Amino acid sequence: MANSRDELVDQVLAAGRRLAAAAVRLHSAVADKQGLSPVEEKALELLENSGALTPGELSQRCGLAPASITGLINRLEQKGFARRSPHPQDRRRLLVHVHRDRQRGADALLKDYLDTVVRLCADYDDEKLRTIAEFTEEIARRQREAAERLSR
């Protein structure tokens, strides 16, 4: 057990690094089971979480160059995971969508893991779960900001 605040903070930082590494490994395994690269899997997850995006928006959120995004979208379309459609307000632009069946496939692969997380949540009262959720959201926000700064 940690004896001081500094040790507790060190434990939080170390746990965060282990969580990030485990997430990369899990998403790589999910990607592999679907015949995708980890980057393709993460791009699909971004699209699922935010809805359809323009290639430029996807490029910015993924941190990939526009030329790389074009190739990524082409591969996702060829593999049947995504599709392009005209932008409803600006016909010069396109939107990239995830095929509905894709979500079900990824969900099925993650079901056992997600079930274990739900069972873990049962060990915590509502106040602790709120704290964990708030902390996790704030960490995610700070990671996005750090990525943005590093991408400049």
Image (cartoon, rainbow, N blue to C red):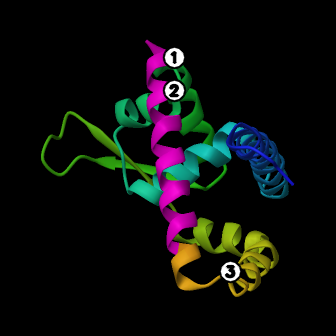
- Which quarter of the picture shows residue 113? bottom right
> CB atoms at circles 1 and 3 under 8 Å apart?
no
Q: Nearer the viewer, residue 134 or 11?
A: 11
Q: Is residue 90 left or right of residue 148?
A: left
Residue where numbered disc 1 is placed: 150
Place residue 115 in its image quadrant. bottom right
The answer, for residue 77, to whether it is visible in the render is no
The residue that label 2 is drawn on is: 147
Q: CA–CA distance between discs 3 and 2?
A: 29 Å
Residue 140 falls within the magenta-colored stretch:
yes
Write down the residue under mark 3.
121
Residue type marked 1: Leu
Judged left or right of residue 125, residue 59 is: left
Region rendered in magenta? 130-152
Determine whether label 2 and label 1 are within 8 Å by CB: yes
**x and y percent of residue 7 in the render?**
77, 40
| Circle 1 or circle 3, nearest the eye | 3
Q: Which quarter of the picture shows residue 117?
A: bottom right
Is 49 in front, or is 1?
A: 1
